[in-house]
Image: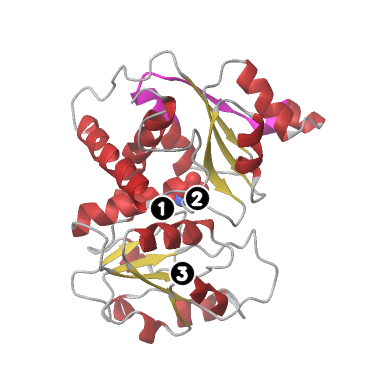
Amino acid sequence: MNQVLKSKDLLGIKELSAPEIKFILDTAFGFKDVLKRDIKKVPTLRGRTVINLFYEPSTRTRTSFELAAKRMSTDVVNFSVSTSSVVKGESIIDTALTVQALGADIIVIRHSSSGVPHLLSHHLRASVINAGDGTNEHPTQALLDAFTIVEKKGGVKGLRIAIVGDISHSRVAKSNIYCLKKLGAEVSLIGPPTLVPKEMEALGVKVFYGMDEGMKDVDVIMMLRIQRERQGKGFFPSTEEYFRKWGLTSERLSLAKDDAIVMHPGPMNRGIEIASEVADGPKSVILDQVTNGLAVRMAVLYLLSGAS
Ligand code: CP
């Protein structure tokens, strides 16, 4: 382990200090330079083994962890839950102990239940990275979002950042609230009362139920996916109604600062939380977020591997 990060694991942003977050971001900027070279592969983690253990679907997170590991010459295995002994009833702890016995130094875990990475961290000597647990946290998403804001805006401190949508079910929102507050941003949450609990103000954020009020003069708009797989029925009347009230359109975007940027963790529901003209427009940094995820995940693997 290095001198700055105190844990062998990355379980959540809640557990990190502001200096730890800044250290990860600084390290990631170094890796972004590596990724601009003609030859993007470095021998930094040769001989190490990373196992991606994804119990939920993923495009961005799993692919970028795999590529990040490969760029650093790590042996990386994408464990396929649907063709594994999990379907015969093997527990998550036995599964993780098994891949550790096969030589895993780092286990990247995504699971539908909150707290699974924390549980594994108690049973494993391997490092555990939370790639999204239930509605709890998605720490590397928040780190790549902060990285993108620093890259586009020069820093996070003092910025007005609005997070819009399904806050209740969003692990991305939770990790971003912790991260952006620790880095000194002024954070507000916007969405329907059924999806934005007023109690979240206890985290030091403002809550707005109307887009026009909440969007005024913000520097960053972070849209969230409507998580239909985690919702029951009745949080809003229909997707059309949701878009009418909380969807990000060009007209609504004009309420933000002229140089505001638009973010979305993906995957997007176009026409429900965001209009295509905004998602593909000049203020969108959505694909930059994806690109930056690679440098950030290289930094996290490197710092937790003990190589630094
Ligand atoms: N943002 C995010 O976690 O995307 P994936 O589900 O595609 O990994």
Q: Residue 181 occupies which quadrant of the picture?
A: bottom left
Is label 2 within 8 A of ligand 1 (CB to nearest ligand atom)?
A: yes
Residue depicted at x 37% and y 18%: 73
Looking at the image, what colour scheme do you see?
secondary structure
Mark sitting earlier along the chain (3/1): 1
Q: Residue 37 occupies which quadrant of the picture?
A: top left
State the residue position of label 2.
Answer: 138
Judge whether 243 appears above or below 146 on screen: below
Q: Nearer the viewer, residue 235 or 139?
A: 139
**Amino acid type at mark 1:** Ala
| For discs 2 and 3, the disc positioned in front in the rendered view | 2
Q: Secondary structure at mark 2?
A: loop
**Amino acid type at mark 2:** His
Q: Are marks 1 and 2 in contact (CB under 8 Å)?
A: yes
Residue depicted at x 52% and y 77%: 242
Query: Which numbered dot is residue 273?
Result: 3
Q: Secondary structure at mark 1?
A: helix
**Amino acid type at mark 3:** Glu
Residue found farthest to the top: 47
Residue depicted at x 74% and y 31%: 86
Mark 2 surroundings within 10 Å by alpha-carbon count, few (fewer than 14), some (14 through 19), many (20 or more): many
